[in-house]
Image (cartoon, rainbow, N blue to C red):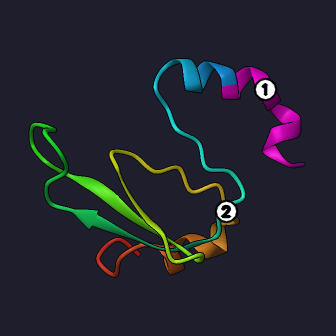
Amino acid sequence: VPLAELYGGELRGWLSGHGVVLQENAGVRTCSFLPTHGERLGGGGWNVSLRDGTSHATDHVILAVPFDRVADLLPEPLA
């Protein structure tokens, strides 16, 4: 069952209201860990490269993919 059918607009609205940016149906190529990111104390964050060639720096990532795809998307030390 697609997550949109389970949670739909209510969850999307709540997350948006709390400053979360969602990118649904975005094909992810890789996720890499950033030792520093913006002004965040302690550094850390993620660079997410999408299949369309764009990339995004972010504090957190939720990989909503089948379990057998996760290791392919994470950097070697985490895979």
Question: Which residue is at 35% across, 76% downward?
Answer: 75
Three-letter residue code for mark 1: Gly
* SS state under label 1: helix
Q: Earlier in the sequence, mark 2 or mark 1?
A: 1
The one of 69 and 8 positioned closer to us in this rendering: 8
Q: Which residues are magenta?
A: 1-12
Q: Is residue 3 magenta?
A: yes
Main SS of the magenta part reads helix
The one of 77 and 52 positioned closer to us in this rendering: 52
Pointer 2 residue: 65
**Mark 1: few/some/many CA within 10 Å (<14, 14-19, 20+):** few
Pointer 1 residue: 9
Question: Which residue is at 10% across, 37% downward?
Answer: 41
Q: Is residue 32 above or below residue 10?
A: below
Report whether 74 appears left or right of 65.
left
Q: Position of residue 49 (x, y in %)?
A: 46, 71
Q: Which quarter of the picture shows residue 79?
A: bottom left
Q: What is the count of numbered marks?
A: 2
Q: Which mark is residue 77?
A: none
* SS state under label 2: loop
